[in-house]
Amino acid sequence: MLRPAASPTPLEIEVVEGPGAITFGTENDSDLFITDPQTDFPPRGRFAWSAYLTEPAGAPVLSVDIVRINPADGSEVVISTLEQEVSNQNAVRFLRRFRVQRLVDAPGVYAVRYIRDGVLLAEGHFRVLGGDEDDDDD
């Protein structure tokens, strides 16, 4: 499948919000907004993201690419592609929750991208820290 051109990865990973952005954190409200936005996560903790698409989903399934980024040269490797099932094709906000170690396999910089038929609808960046800080098993 054709993938859209990615935005350049910023050297400083920052919290982003609004249309076209994916905001990361650990808590959310009932409207699918992240209530504690952050960019850095321990490798064994939990995290969530809220994707705010630039336009309605417009399809029954969206692709969600998880990409590892080499900050030294900007090269990227898609480490997995998830499916986001869409019950309301007019929806523009989606929430996902994961344990960090089930989504990524090493410390580093990552991007998440929501894609429909080669069109990038939302993108965000996060960092997984080294070590076993905040091992949350509840």
Image (cartoon, rainbow, N blue to C red):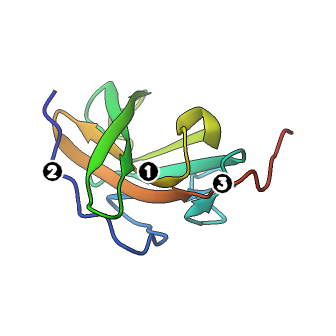
Q: Between marks 2 and 3, how big is the CA–CA gap? A: 30 Å
Quarter of the view holding residue 7: bottom left
Q: Position of residue 87 (x, y in %)?
A: 43, 27
Q: Position of residue 56 (x, y in %)?
A: 29, 44
Q: Residue at x 36, y 53 (%)?
A: 69
Q: Position of residue 74 (x, y in %)?
A: 27, 59
Is label 3 in a helix, a strand or a loop? loop
Q: Point out the tag, 2 or 3, that comes first from the N-terminus.
A: 2
Residue 98 appears in the picture as rendered = no
Q: Point out the tag, 1 or 2, that comes first from the N-terminus.
A: 2
Task: Name the foreground residue: 65 vs 73.
Answer: 73
The amino acid pointed to by label 1 is Ala
Q: Between marks 3 and 1, how big is the CA–CA gap? A: 12 Å
Q: Residue at x 71, y 44 (%)?
A: 44
Residue at the spot of label 2: 5
Crowding at mark 2 (Cα within 10 Å: few <14, some 14-19, many 20+): few
Q: Between marks 1 and 2, how big is the CA–CA gap? A: 18 Å
Crowding at mark 3 (Cα within 10 Å: few <14, some 14-19, many 20+): some
Crowding at mark 1 (Cα within 10 Å: few <14, some 14-19, many 20+): many
Residue 106 drawn above or below residue 37 = above
- Quarter of the picture containing the C terminus is top right
Residue 87 appears in the picture as rendered = yes
The amino acid pointed to by label 3 is Asn
Q: Nearer the viewer, mark 2 or mark 3?
A: 2
Residue at the spot of label 1: 51
Is label 1 in a helix, a strand or a loop? strand
Q: Residue at x 25, y 35 (%)?
A: 58
Residue at the spot of label 3: 28
Is label 2 in a helix, a strand or a loop? loop
Residue 66 drawn above or below residue 51 = above
